[in-house]
Every structure is written in structure tokens, then in C-alpha cells.
Image: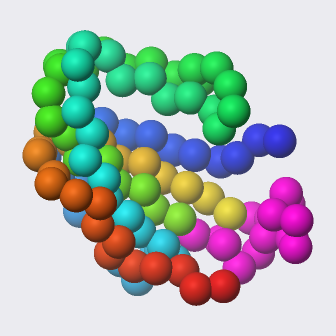
Amino acid sequence: MSVPVEISIWDSEPHYLLAQWQHVVEAPLQLQKDLLEIHECMGEAKAHFAIPAGDYTGRALFRGLDTLSKDGLKGKDFYEVQVWPQKLEALRVLKQWLN
């Protein structure tokens, strides 16, 4: 099953409109090597990004969650992941989707 995901790497925190998303979370990310790999849920790497090792924040944005079928396999859902250099101490839920 394919899932639409857009990944972007930024030099600083990117602007976004909270109202355009149903669920938004931020999480700390610490890179030990100059490489960020994006893996599918239960498998291999799907993308590689050469970025300097260090502390980053990752923001995951979700929309279209209300279009998913009961089994969660069909719908018009979309996901965006934004990454930028900034140390974040703990996971933050900025907007929570309550089904």
C-alpha cells in the first residue's frame, strides 16, 4: 500500500498553518551521522538525505484522516514531514486528531 508523504529539510523552522491539518506533532531527532534515512513502516529505506549530524526537530502533519476506510487502507489522507536544525527536549502534540 502506498501512502502520500512529502518530506522537506529546512535551514530553520518552517511556517505552516495549523488550521490546514488535522493532527500535528513535533519530536526530537538526533543524527549521529551526516545522513537522515526515511524508512517505510515495516521495511527498507525509501529516501536518504545528506545533512549534518546534530540535533533536529521533526514535525509530522496529517490531513484527510476523516477519509480513511474502516480498515485504514483506503482514503485521501496526506502526510508531510518537516525537519530543521533545532534541539527539542520532548515530543509535543500541537493538534490532536480525535476520531
The structure residue drawn at horizontal position 68% and vertical position 25%, both measured from the top left corner, is 43
Image height check: is 5 above or below 24?
Answer: above
Between 88 and 22, the one nearer to me in the picture: 88
Residue 9 located within the stretch drawn in magenta: no
The structure residue drawn at horizontal position 77% and vertical position 41%, both measured from the top left corner, is 2
Magenta residues: mostly which secondary structure?
loop
Residue 20 in the image: state x and y as whole percent. 45, 77
Image height check: is 85 above or below 32?
Answer: below
Q: Can residue 17 be seen?
A: no
Residue 41 in the image: state x and y as whole percent. 65, 38
Residue numbers of the magenta segment? 63-76
Image height check: is 4 above or below 99?
Answer: above
The structure residue drawn at horizontal position 49% and vertical position 29%, both measured from the top left corner, is 38
Between 53 and 79, the one nearer to me in the picture: 53
- In the figure, is residue 35 to the left or right of 23? left
Between 12 and 28, the one nearer to me in the picture: 28
- In the figure, is residue 4 to the left or right of 2? left
- In the figure, is residue 11 to the left or right of 5? left
Q: Can residue 42 be seen?
A: yes
Classify residue 25 by image quadrant.
bottom left
Between 13 and 92, the one nearer to me in the picture: 92
Residue 9 in the image: state x and y as whole percent. 30, 36
The structure residue drawn at horizontal position 69% and vertical position 33%, both measured from the top left corner, is 42
Q: Quadrant of the N terminus?
A: top right
Classify residue 90 by image quadrant.
bottom left
Q: How is the image coloured?
A: rainbow
Residue 66 in the image: state x and y as whole percent. 71, 79
Q: Quadrant of the C terminus?
A: bottom right
